[in-house]
Structure formats: structure tokens, C-alpha cells
């Protein structure tokens, strides 16, 4: 058993490298924010070999992509200091910058020492100075960590750059397709395949502690829900009833899955206790009831239902009871996901034939449509609620995009080949 | 350019990015940005394993494969030659023009009680994928109901929905979508 696991891991790792190489991922900002704060991330001074990761590029891309900041292109910089004593703030004031960061990175065989300083350009005040150590292959994560620190310092909100996403990608293989469930950094780099199959894989959902992913696989030519532990690769089938086994969503305490089953007729929402494997049926009737998700406090379950004729979102007590309709605008509202604080609800909204991502403010119930696509799907909030990740079809291919919650900023994570769908942002 | 003493204190602060084999330290400094501890979110490099699912029984997906069917199935004037039933947008109702097709398959199955079929339901790519799984299943169940009412036994029929996951046409316009909203009658 151990041996098999190891061989599998080796195989996956080998496969991974080719994916990483072939992926040629690019991040393209498709819509910029007018009110973004100008910030300059000066290229870090380098000592020793640090490979091909350029920290300042990663940090600039993170911050620029957040919608809160506009990162100064390196070519526009008049000087490129790396030590605090060398900074002439006038150089940065004339470039209209509000903040700037400088740093150094030194590779000493296997690990890296990084330090950086963040300044207010207007008064020269040092806002932050940090020293970090990163292991081999961890430079990108270190850069994301620095982005998180700068973001939190300047916005007062926690950053979400050093987080992960899961998604399903598919590539043509022979006459068919190969589906791969992958986990990557939030910017799409470092993809790792955690499951693959010639039959569809769908609906990855993270456990609240980020250690497991539940997903649907059709590799037996029927739908089945699996729960896989990321660290070990160990997986277990938890639902293989006749008909649909779909749309898993972990309860906030991680002990249960809300799922969709059609074993009793039409698709209905059930709660599966992962310990006892007991099932509780929450919805009934002839309508389609699917895509359940939990409110962050675990008290309610939101789901898509066509009980009113068209798909709309409904909310009901997680213990069962009466469902109340949540969406009234437009003739198609589906696949809801709450922000971690429960104040916002992202959904797919359809009108006039197009499907876009919208966010509802739960207090006022006002809906803000964030995207302009026609085939946008699968919204998922960043853990800090600042961005929504979704799948968009642009130019005939499905790719991942990120939009700021106010809709001002949008960027695309583009893989060179294959379709990328069903993203889920890790908690 | 102005540096005060807090700078030195700030510069002393050390945070270690805790991924994989490195560890975190943080010295002094009451900075509001306490270390976001990357290791709590698990999954350090190299610690993740993957799984590969096999290709099952290897029978190719689609209609007609894997079964020895008579010449009537390839005669274009015979409704049995049609093994795909198409649907309107957001609808699981079998259209009038496909009623004779379903009826022909039902008659064949009723007179061949050992013959099995898989009714696989599909949706176009628009809207959310799990809702489309539900829609695809309702389409295949519509066909199943019609067949059952015409004497086909439950054990002869199996229903599966692939939603929008297996389009036959990969375009992104109505002409592609209408070919993807379908139920395939797959003789086993």
C-alpha cells in the first residue's frame, strides 16, 4: 500500500512538472480600477542564485490584481534602491506614488533570506520592515506572504494572496478528454494534480480546515462523491446512490456534507453525516433542488431551486423546515456561495441569455452584477471577501478569472491549453 | 529622507514563511501584521499525493456502441436509427417530433427484454454546472418515463446525467447548444 502510494506520488509529480511547463500561465488584467492606490515595488537586490522567481513582479502582480493598488511598472522607475538609506523619496513623489517597497533576497543553498521595507512616499515614514526565510521552491509563497503583509498594513484587511485554489481542468486526449482536479496557488501557479480521470470530475469543495477536498467523479460511468485528504492522497467514496450524487459542500464544522441526490425522484438536497453516513433529506417535491451551501454559522442552507418555475436561490434552516426565496431579480439565479463573514452572497445570474457573476448584500438584499461575460460560472469568494474567483468563457475557452467584490478590477488566469472550470478558493 | 528609531526595531522583525520545511519565527515588534501562518493551511510542497482513476470498463461513451444491433438501427428510414433526442432550452419535455423515436426504441426494448440501454442526459453549457446535471437527469428521466409507460421494464433502463460536461459540439452558439441539449439512447 505504501509502495503504491509512493509510486503514484512520483507519477503525479512527474506529470505535474509537465503540466507546469506546458501551462505557461499568464495573468492578464482585463479591467483596471480608476481609484487604485499607486505603489512601487522596487526589484529586490539579489545575492546568489535565486532561480527565475522575481519577487517584485509577483508582489506587483498580487497587489495590482487586487483592485486596491496600481503597481508602478519597473521601466518607469528612476532609481532602484534596495537599502533604506538609498531611497530618495522625491524620486517617487514625482512619479505620483503613495507607497513604495524595497528589499533584498539572498540565496544560501536551499533557502533564501529575504528582507523588505515599506514606506509612505509622502512623509518618508517607514511603515514596515520584515525579514523572512523561505525554503527551496518557496520564493513565490514568500512573495505572496509579503503581498499579504503589505495589503493588510495598507488596507486594514487580511490579504488572500498566500492562499490556494482548486479547479478542474480538461485536455483533449485521443477521441476523448482527460479531466484533472488540480490545486494551485491563488494566482494559478504551482498547479498539482490530485485526481484525474477520462470521465468528468466536478464540483471540488474544500473542507473548512483546508485539509480535504470533496468532489464528484464519473470514473465509474456514474456520479459518485469522493472525499480526498490532500496530504496523503487517500480518498474515499462517500455517496454512490442511484442517480445524481452531486454538489458537495462541507458544513462549517467539517462533520457533514450537504449534497444533491436524486435517488428518491427529482434532485433534492440532503445532509450526509460523514461519521455515521446517515442521511437527512432537506427538500422534496418535483422541483430541481440542488447546489446547496452552508451559511458560515452553519444554521442555514442556501440552494438553487426551480420550484417557482425558474432557478432561484432559497434559504432554509440546516435542520430542515420551510425554505424562503432569496433572489427575485432576473429569471436565473443559481450556485450561491457566501463570503466567510456571511454578509455577501455570490451567484450566477442570468438575464437576456447571458450568465454573469453577481453579489448580493445580505443585509439590504441589493444585487450588484460584477462581470460582463456571457458564460460566467462557479463563483467563489476569497477567504478575506475581497475578490470573487469564477470560471469565464472568453474567446471560446473556459478560463479562471478573478473580480474584486466591487467589480472595479478583473483579471484572468490563463492557462495555455485546455479548459479550466469549477474553481473553489480554499478557506 | 527621515529614519527614526522605530525603523531599527521594525527592521529586526523576522517572519519566516512557513511552508514545507521551513519554520516561523517572529521577533519583537508590536506590528499589527502578525504572521499569517501559511503552514496552518497545510499542503506543503511534496506532501501532497494524487490519485488516478482508471478508465472503467473502457467502453466508449455514446450511442449504439458495445451492442450487436440489427440492420434496422442503421436504416435511416427507421426511427431506431435515431438514438439522440434533442430538447428545448431549460426544458425536459420530449418534443413531438421525437415521440415516434422514443416509441420505436420502447417497442424494440419491450420485445427484447434482455436488452439494456443507458439513457444519458446532457445540457448545454449555459448556467451553472450542477443545475445542468439536474436538468440532464430530468431529460433522461422524461425519456425513461415514456419508455416505461410503453412496457419497457425498469431493469432494462439506466439513467445517468452528465450535465454540460460532455458536449458533442464544442461551439458557443445556439447551433452548438441545441445539439448538446440531448438524451443519448445507448444500447449496451
Image: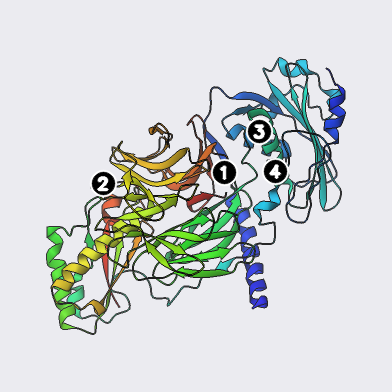
Q: Are marks 2 and 3 in contact (CB under 8 Å)?
A: no
> Which element type, helix, strand or loop, lies under badge 3?
helix
Question: Residue at coordinates 36% horizontally, 69% vertically from top-left?
Answer: B61
Label located before the other in sequence (1 or 3):
3
Q: On screen, A44 above or below A290?
A: above
Query: What separation in Å lies between label 4 and label 3 (alpha carbons)?
Result: 12 Å
Q: Which mark is residue B36?
A: 4
Taking depth in this image into account, of A378 and A32 the one nearest to the observer is A378
Residue matched to label 2: A310
Q: Quadrant of residue B4?
A: top right
Chain holding disc 3:
A
Q: Nearer the viewer, mark 1 or mark 3?
A: 1
Q: Where is residue A150 shown, x and y percent of the image?
A: 69, 33
Which residue has dot 1 on it? A383
Rounded to the nearest whole Å, what is the CA distance between mark 1 and mark 3? 14 Å
Question: Can marks 4 and 3 be said to lie on one chain?
Answer: no
Graded by Cα atoms within 10 Å as few (under 14), some (14 to 19) or many (20 or more), the crowding at tag 3 reads many
Quadrant, the N terminus of chain A: bottom right
Q: Chain of mark 1?
A: A
Indicate which disc, 2 or 1, sits on the residue closer to the N terminus.
2
Tag of residue A151 = 3
- Name the residue located 52 percent from the left edge and 64 percent from the top edge: A227
Please tell me how crowded label 1 is: few (under 14), some (14-19), or many (20+) other residues with Cα within 10 Å: many
Of all chains, the one bearing label 4 is B
Distance between the alpha carbons at the discs numbered 1 and 4 = 13 Å
Amino acid at each position: 500500500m505504501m509502495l503504491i502510494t509512493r509510486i503514484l506520488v512520483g507519477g503525479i509529480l512527474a506529470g505535474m512538472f509537465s503540466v507546469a511547463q506546458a501551462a505557461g500561465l499568464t495573468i492578464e488584467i482585463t479591467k483596471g480600477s480608476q481609484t487604485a492606490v499607486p505603489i512601487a515595488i522596487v526589484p529586490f537586490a539579489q545575492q546568489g542564485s535565486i532561480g527565475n522567481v522575481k519577487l517584485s513582479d509577483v508582489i506587483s502582480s498580487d497587489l495590482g490584481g487586487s483592485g486596491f493598488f496600481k503597481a508602478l511598472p519597473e521601466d518607469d522607475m528612476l532609481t532602484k534602491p534596495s537599502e533604506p538609506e538609498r531611497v530618495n523619496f522625491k524620486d517617487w513623489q514625482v512619479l505620483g506614488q503613495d507607497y513604495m517597497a524595497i528589499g533584498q533576497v539572498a540565496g544560501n543553498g536551499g533557502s533564501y533570506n529575504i528582507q523588505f521595507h515599506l514606506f509612505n512616499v509622502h512623509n518618508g515614514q517607514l511603515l514596515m520592515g520584515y525579514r523572512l526565510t523561505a525554503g527551496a521552491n518557496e520564493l513565490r509563497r514568500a512573495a505572496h506572504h509579503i503581498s499579504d503583509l503589505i495589503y493588510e498594513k495598507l488596507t486594514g484587511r487580511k490579504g488572500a494572496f498566500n492562499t490556494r485554489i482548486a479547479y478542474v481542468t480538461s485536455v483533449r486526449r485521443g477521441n476523448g478528454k482527460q479531466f484533472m482536479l488540480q490545486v494551485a496557488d491563488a494566482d494559478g501557479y504551482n498547479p498539482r494534480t490530485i485526481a484525474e480521470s477520462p470521465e468528468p470530475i466536478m464540483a471540488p469543495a474544500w473542507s473548512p480546515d483546508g485539509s480535504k477536498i470533496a468532489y464528484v467523479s464519473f470514473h465509474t460511468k456514474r456520479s459518485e462523491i469522493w472525499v480526498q485528504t490532500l496530504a496523503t492522497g487517500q480518498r474515499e467514496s462517500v455517496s454512490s446512490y442511484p442517480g445524481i450524487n452531486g454538489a458537495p459542500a462541507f458544513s462549517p464544522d467539517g462533520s457533514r456534507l450537504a449534497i444533491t441526490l436524486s435517488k428518491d425522484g427529482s434532485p433534492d438536497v440532503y445532509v450526509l453525516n460523514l461519521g455515521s453516513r446517515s442521511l437527512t433529506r432537506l427538500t422534496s417535491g418535483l422541483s430541481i433542488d440542488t447546489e446547496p451551501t452552508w451559511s458560515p454559522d452553519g444554521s442555514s442552507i442556501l440552494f438553487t431551486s426551480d420550484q417557482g418555475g425558474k432557478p432561484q436561490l432559497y434559504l432554509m434552516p440546516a435542520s430542515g423546515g420551510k425554505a424562503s426565496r432569496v433572489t427575485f431579480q432576473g429569471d436565473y439565479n443559481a450556485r450561491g456561495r457566501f463570503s466567510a463573514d456571511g454578509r455577501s452572497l455570490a451567484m450566477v445570474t442570468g438575464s437576456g441569455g447571458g450568465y454573469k457573476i453577481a453579489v448580493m448584500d445580505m443585509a439590504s438584499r441589493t444585487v450588484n452584477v460584477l462581470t460582463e461575460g456571457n458564460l460566467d460560472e462557479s463563483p467563489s469568494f476569497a477567504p478575506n471577501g475581497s475578490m470573487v474567483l469564477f470560471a469565464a468563457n472568453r474567446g471560446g475557452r473556459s478560463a479562471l478569472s478573478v473580480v474584486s467584490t466591487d467589480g472595479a478590477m478583473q483579471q484572468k488566469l490563463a492557462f495555455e491549453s485546455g479548459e479550466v472550470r469549477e474553481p473553489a478558493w480554499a478557506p | 529622507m527621515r529614519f527614526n528609531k522605530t525603523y531599527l526595531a521594525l527592521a529586526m522583525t523576522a517572519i519566516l514563511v512557513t511552508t514545507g520545511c521551513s519554520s516561523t519565527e517572529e521577533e519583537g515588534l508590536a506590528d499589527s501584521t502578525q504572521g499569517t501562518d501559511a503552514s496552518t493551511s497545510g499542503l506543503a510542497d511534496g506532501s501532497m499525493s494524487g490519485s488516478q482513476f482508471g478508465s472503467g470498463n473502457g467502453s466508449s461513451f455514446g450511442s449504439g456502441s458495445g451492442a450487436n444491433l440489427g440492420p434496422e438501427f442503421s436504416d435511416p428510414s427507421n426511427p431506431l436509427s435515431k438514438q439522440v433526442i434533442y430538447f428545448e432550452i431549460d426544458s425536459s419535455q420530449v418534443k413531438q417530433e421525437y415521440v415516434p423515436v422514443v416509441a420505436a426504441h420502447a417497442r424494440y426494448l419491450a420485445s427484447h427484454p434482455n436488452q439494456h440501454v443507458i439513457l444519458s442526459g446532457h445540457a448545454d453549457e449555459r448556467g451553472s454546472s450542477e443545475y445542468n446535471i439536474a436538468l440532464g437527469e430530468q431529460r433522461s428521466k422524461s425519456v425513461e418515463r415514456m419508455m416505461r409507460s410503453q412496457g419497457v421494464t425498469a431493469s432494462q433502463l439506466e439513467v445517468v446525467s452528465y450535465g454540460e460536461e460532455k458536449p458533442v459540439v464544442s461551439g458557443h452558439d445556439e447551433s452548438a447548444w441545441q445539439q448538446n441539449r440531448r438524451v443519448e439512447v445507448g444500447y449496451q
